[in-house]
Image (cartoon, rainbow, N blue to C red):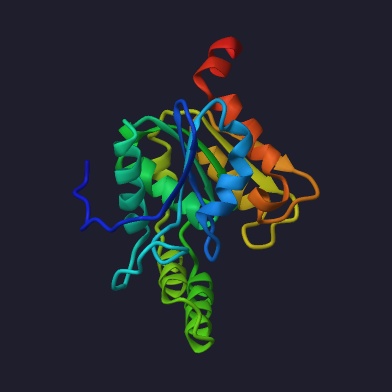
Amino acid sequence: MPSLPPAIEIAVTALGDGPPVLALHDIGTSGAVMADALTPLAGEHRIIAPDLRGHGDSPTPDGPWSVDDFAADAARLVSAEGGSAIVVGAGLGGVAALALTLGHAGLVGGLVLTGVGALAETQAGQERWTRLARGLREREAPEGIALAAEAMGGRPDWRGALSQLSLPAIVLAGEDDQATPPEKQRELALSLPGARFISVPDAGHSLPATVPERLVDAVRALSPDARAVAA
């Protein structure tokens, strides 16, 4: 397991009891969005919904950051719960979930991903994230969101590494997602052995806010009891 950078005190919303579900939000939002989306699972799972570094009530350590910094923060939270969590990630949270799985595979029992692909950004994509970060700073937005945007621009191509994983996964793609087009998310599903790809009609990039029930259904489908019945 890779060594972890210095720990920071991440703010967390936690609810429910049972096997852990780690819920990682998109850039510019907070853990409350994921906690609200997954509240119907509180009778079956313990939901851990952190504010990612630089967001909500979590601190903003000095940058630059990489996606592995978000993964390290998540790894500490899952370790504290005993490991083997189902990890739900949207956008930035999906990137963090993939980095967590690749760097700390023993902590992840299943993945539900939306709004994320397996490819590194093209040069044009990197420049878009850089412009976004610059614009955020010019508008005096929280520095953590700008640092997160820069980290997103520098994420790696994971296709080869993902092909070595063996865990249940579901990729949910909004048919109208303009930020991460469905074909990129389908490619992610193809890179994960055994992953299911589900196209979600009449939905865009922000599934946790618009169709949270699809995330709830996906987590239930990955729960050990559901997999045992399916087998």
Rendered view: 18 above or below 127: above
Left or right: where 221 falls relative to 123: right
Residue 75 lies in what quarter of the image?
top left
Rendered view: 131 above or below 39: below
Residue 158 appears in the picture as rendered: no
Please name whichever residue, 15 or 185, is drawn nearer the observer in this view of the structure: 15
Residue at the right extreme of this rendering? 202
Left or right: where 69 falls relative to 175: left
Left or right: where 101 falls relative to 29: left
Rendered view: 104 above or below 226: below
Q: How many marks?
A: 0
For the point 60% across and 40% down, the residue is 38
For the point 52% across and 58% down, the residue is 30
Residue 143 lies in what quarter of the image?
bottom left
For the point 19% across and 49% down, the residue is 3
Quadrant occupied by the N terminus? top left
Quadrant occupied by the C terminus? top right
Please name whichever residue, 161 or 14, is drawn nearer the observer in this view of the structure: 14
Q: In the image, residue 217 lies at what x, y percent?
A: 65, 31
Please name whichever residue, 2 or 56, is drawn nearer the observer in this view of the structure: 56
Q: In the image, residue 36 lies at what x, y percent?
A: 61, 46
Residue 216 appears in the picture as rendered: yes
Q: In the image, residue 39 lies at what x, y percent?
A: 60, 39
